[in-house]
Image (tube, rainbow, N blue to C red):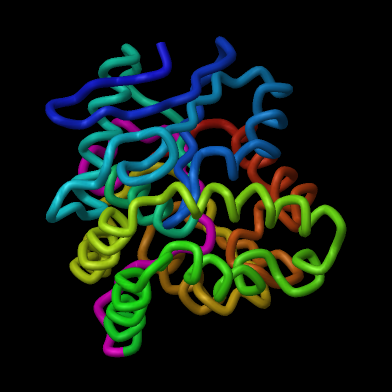
Amino acid sequence: MAFFIHGPHRHYYYDSGAGSPVLLLHGLGNSGRAWAPQASALLSLGHRVIVSDLLGHGASSEAPEGITAHAQALEMLALLDHLGLESTHLIGLSLGGMVALEMACHAPEAVQQLVVAGTFASMNSTYRQGLLNDWAANLAQADGCLKRFKATWPALVGADYAASAEGQCLYQAWHAQAAQLSAQSQIRWCNGMKRYDLSNQLPAIQAATLVLAAEGDLISPRSEAEDITQRIDHARQITLPGDGHVFNIPYVQAFNQAICTFLQEPLQHA
C-alpha cells in the first residue's frame, strides 16, 4: 500500500526493503522525493526505507487548519503503528527535523537512533517569527508557492550546485513540484511553525542523536545545530563543508557517509 488513512488525513508513503526500518521526513515545500539519494544508500545497507510526504506536500492530503510539527509527529507515530513497527531509526531535515524531534520527545521509545539536519530547537524568536510571517504573506500572492521556490532556490542547494547541470535539472523537477503545492497548506504550515518551541523538551530524547549542519547554511546556521546538540544526551554534531539548506542534495556523498556510519553503530539510549 502507498497510502495510510488516519482520520480525515491521507498520507502517501514509500516503503521498500525488509531490514531495520528508517523513516525519512522532508522539509517545507518539498516532498519525500528529496530523499532519493539517501533512500538508495540505506537500501544498499539492508535497511527498510520508509519515506512519507508530510501533510500539505507531495501526494498526501492538504494540511489542516492548526497544523503543527507536533500534530504531524502524532500522524507519523500512527503510521508506524499502521506498519506494525514499535520503533524506527528516524531522519529529518528542516521541518522534517522538527517533526522528528517532536516524535523523539513525545514517544522516546519509538525512536532507535535519530538524525536531524538543518533544523531548529525553536522558532520562537523575533527574527524567525517575522520570517515566517513574510513567507506566509508571499505565499498568499498569485503563484505564491512558485515565487517562494524561485526566491529561495540558491539558498536551498547552494549557489554552486544551483548553477551546475545537475542543479539545473533538479530545479526543473522541483519547480514543477512547487507548482503543485497548495498555498493554503503552506501558509498553514508557516503559521503552525510559529508555535514550535522544543528548547526545554529536548532533554527528554533518549535515542543516540546525530545533528548535521552545513557550514554555509543560511537558513539554519551551525549555531542552531550546536544548541540542539547541547540539549540532548548522547548527541553529537557534525558540520559538513559547503552551503545550502537542503544539503543532503549537493553533498550526497558526505551526507550519506555521515548517516550510514552513524546508523551502523550499536544502539544506545540514555
Which quadrant, please, contains the C terminus? top left
| In-front residue for pair 53/84 | 53
| In-front residue for pair 108/44 | 44
Extent of the magenta region: 104-126
| In-front residue for pair 268/187 | 187
Residue at the (28%, 79%) spot, across then down? 133
Q: Is residue 193 left or right of residue 112?
A: left
Picture coordinates of residue 5, whole percent (x, y)? 23, 21
Q: Residue furthest front?
A: 142
Which quadrant, please, contains the N terminus? top left
Residue at the (46%, 64%) spot, across then down? 229
User: Is residue 230 inside the magenta stretch?
Assistant: no
Q: Is residue 242 left or right of residue 7?
A: right
Residue at the (71%, 51%) spot, across then down? 170
Picture coordinates of residue 127, whole percent (x, y)? 34, 88
Picture coordinates of residue 213, whole percent (x, y)? 59, 66
Q: Residue furthest right?
A: 165
| In-front residue for pair 154/99 | 154
Specify the quadrant of the image occupied by residue 4.
top left
Picture coordinates of residue 17, whole percent (x, y)? 59, 14
Q: Is residue 67 visible?
A: yes
User: Is residue 116 inside the magenta stretch?
Assistant: yes
Q: Is residue 111 left or right of residue 70?
A: right
Residue at the (70%, 23%) spot, across then down? 45
- Vertical arrangement, residue 214 with respect to residue 188, above or below: below
Specify the quadrant of the image occupied by residue 39.
top right
Q: Residue furthest bottom?
A: 126
